[in-house]
Amino acid sequence: MTLLNSFLAKTLPFIPKPIVGKVSSRYIAGTLLSDAVNVVKGLNAEGTMTTLDILGEDVHEHDKAEAVKAEWMRVLEEIERNRLDSNISVKPSQLGFRIDLDYCYNNLRSLVEAARAKGNFVRIDMEDSTMTTSTIWLYTRLREEGFENVGIVIQAYLHRSDADVRQLARMKANIRICKGIYRESPEIAYQERDEIRRNFGLLLRVMIENGCSVGIATHDKYLVEKAYELIQKANLPKERYEFQMLLGVREQLRRSIIADGHRLRVYVPFGEQWYAYSVRRLKENPQIAGYVLKALLTGNNT
């Protein structure tokens, strides 16, 4: 079944959109902000923090970047109005990175400033390796301007991440560490699971030892247990770390982490760009693609 799932994952672009939509509905809150708000309310009721994520990237026009910024401002207002335990995660390429870096920075700064006024927090997401240096520059510039309510993401599979973490650790950065999802060449990124796991653990240790606040973003039970060891060894206060997972993924592990007394945050994606996101996620996890096969065989695609 594993080989079949892998084959199916590669053929996803040819699968009817309604079927992909049915399967991915578990992983996406919906197309509207109101859909996402309802999902967040449910997660908050379970004792889970959240991060809202508007789907979409690679904006090349000013008017579209301005529209995304306006939508993010509305998200911050809804979080405050509904008293949600949620922050936001934004992609630089949504805010004009492909247009002009200074323009992107100004848009990002406006969001961080608005979030600070509301007592909220902005995570700057990390995209492909062509953007890593500039994304770190965006974060560093915000911190130099005195913004503390902002964090960044480091991808453990990149060879450069050790140097990046040590640079960020000097300012006690708030860092979300994940394995990494973009296809990168062996020249710049580890390819084997054990190599990535090993580097993830090493980077997490450096963050903890240097006083960073860390978001431990993983669905890998092995890495969760490794994080437990590091947290216990450092006697790390709960306000210095949290686990982070995607909506609908490994919910049993999520419940276990919470039951063990750790803070956990769920990333809640929503928006009109759900299809591209869904196809990417299904390709990353061929086991999920098996659910698509089941939908095809049963005709349950409504």
Image (cartoon, rainbow, N blue to C red):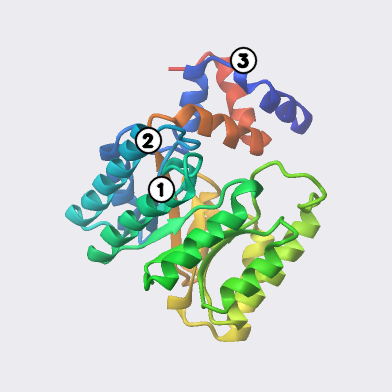
Badge 2 density bin: few <14, some 14–19, many ≥20, Cα 10 Å: some
Q: Which residue is mark 2?
A: 62
User: What's the amino acid at mark 1?
Assistant: Tyr
Badge 1 density bin: few <14, some 14–19, many ≥20, Cα 10 Å: some
SS state under label 3:
helix
Circle nearer the viewer, 3 or 1: 1
Residue 205 locus on image (x, y percent): 66, 76
Q: Residue at x 60, y 75 (%)?
A: 207
- Outermost left residue: 81
User: What's the amino acid at mark 2?
Assistant: His
Q: Judge from the rendering whether residue 149 lies leftward or rightward of residue 56; answer left or right.
A: left
Q: Earlier in the sequence, mark 3 or mark 1?
A: 3
Q: Earlier in the sequence, mark 2 or mark 1?
A: 2
Name the quadrant of the N terminus: top right
SS state under label 1:
helix
Task: State the residue in front, 53 or 249.
Answer: 53
Name the quadrant of the C terminus: top left
Residue 284 locus on image (x, y percent): 65, 38
Q: Residue at x 46, y 65 (%)?
A: 141
Looking at the picture, does residue 82 appear above or below residue 294? below
Task: State the residue in front, 120 or 46.
Answer: 120
Looking at the picture, does residue 216 appear above or below residue 169? above
Say if mark 2 contacts mark 1, CB within 8 Å.
Answer: yes
Q: Residue at x 78, y 44 (%)?
A: 185
Q: Which residue is mark 1?
A: 103
Mark seen at residue 143 = none
Mark seen at residue 14 = 3
Circle nearer the viewer, 3 or 2: 2
Task: State the residue in front, 225 or 272.
Answer: 272
